[in-house]
Every structure is written in C-alpha cells, then in structure tokens.
Amino acid sequence: MRVNVYSLILTITLIMVSITPLILCAIEYNWDIHRILSPVFKPPKIDFSIRFKGLGFENGNIMIYLTLRNRGEVPLNITGLEGEILVLGSVVLGNISIPKPVYVDVGESRELKLLLNLRREALIEIVKSILGGSIELKAEVKAIVEVEIYGVKARVPLKYEFELPLHLGL
C-alpha cells in the first residue's frame, strides 16, 4: 500500500510542476492564448545624424564632406547614394554620389564624402549670389541612400539642409 501512496504523491507533484508555469503564464497574458504563442519582435532602432563639415577638392573633383553619426542600435553600411543638391530653393547645383562605401558602427562617427558633379546653370546662379554679396547659400540634399544592415539591403530617402559657403578658403 505504501507504493501507491508514493506514486500518488509523485504524480500530484509532477502535475503541479507541469501545470503551474502554464497557469502563471496564462495569468500574465490575461488568458490570451494568441499572445502567449505569438512571438514578440521589437525591431532595432535605426537612427543617424548628419552634419556639414566642409568643401574641398580631391583628384580634380569637388567633394562635400559630411559627418555621419550612428545613433541607432545596429551598425550601418552605406553602400551607395544618388541624388542632387538644390540651392536657392529650386536650382539644382549638381548630382551627388559617394565614391566608396562607408561603414559606421553603433555610437561611432565617420566622414561621408559626397562627390559633386556641378551643373553649368548652377555656376551662373552662384556667381550672381557672390556678386550680390552673399557669403553662403542655403543648400538642400535630396538623395536615395543604399544601406545594408545585417545583410538586408534597403533604399532610404535622405533630405538634409545646410549652409553652403561660397568661399573655399583658398
């Protein structure tokens, strides 16, 4: 008869050990079975800031130097950029691109070089502004940035405004 009592106690203990976590889980999720069985995914934060650093020349090309700071939770790999820079509200200064990919780890800053292919029509407007006494122009970058995050490629629109100096410090 003792074997049956031990078996009964062991069976009740196993049932309690098996069912108690399920009951506690159901109480935690307000008895919503769908919420219990559905995985919860919180996408990582993707955030960066851009700051105008300056203008310059490299290998006979006009370069715009920006500082890119990764404020997100995942590293960024900028693999491409195509767009244009507008000045005076609607005058296209030229097309921009990046000469090589830029990798920015979480919390780091990197220099982002933009290669500027200047348009002749824009030169006329810049000369008019200089002759009018302006020392800088309000510029706006409108571009599509190709980003790779953990092997996933995405095309993201970029819009950034900055003051473009009309002197190069030469």
Image (cartoon, rainbow, N blue to C red):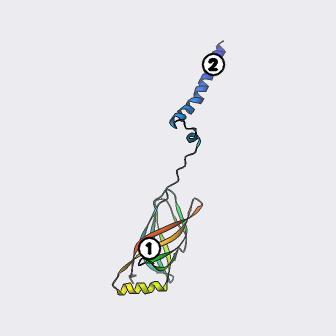
Q: Viewer-proximal residue, 41 or 76? A: 41
Q: Relative to 34, is 132 above or below?
A: below
Residue 92 x, y percent position in the rendering: 47, 79
Q: Nearer the observer, disc 2 or disc 1?
A: 1
Residue 45 x, y percent position in the rendering: 49, 56
| Mark 2 secondary-structure assignment | helix
* The C terminus: image quadrant: bottom left
Estimate how packed mark 2 is, as few (under 14), some (14 to 19) or many (20 or more) residues with alpha carbons within 10 Å: few
Estimate how packed mark 1 is, as few (under 14), some (14 to 19) or many (20 or more) residues with alpha carbons within 10 Å: many
Q: Relative to 66, is 71 above or below?
A: above
Q: Relative to 30, is 85 above or below?
A: below
User: Residue at image x 46%, y 73%?
Assistant: 141
Earlier in the chain: of badge 2 and badge 1, it is: 2
Determine contact: label 2, label 1, CB under 8 Å: no
User: Residue at image x 51%, y 36%?
Assistant: 30
Q: Locate residue 136: give its quadrant.
A: bottom left
Q: Using residue 26 as the reference point, say whether residue 1 is left or right of it.
A: right
Residue 126 x, y percent position in the rendering: 41, 84
Residue where numbered disc 1 is placed: 140
Residue where numbered disc 2 is placed: 8
Which residue type carries mark 1?
Glu
Residue 58, labelled with which disc?
A: none
* The N terminus: image quadrant: top right
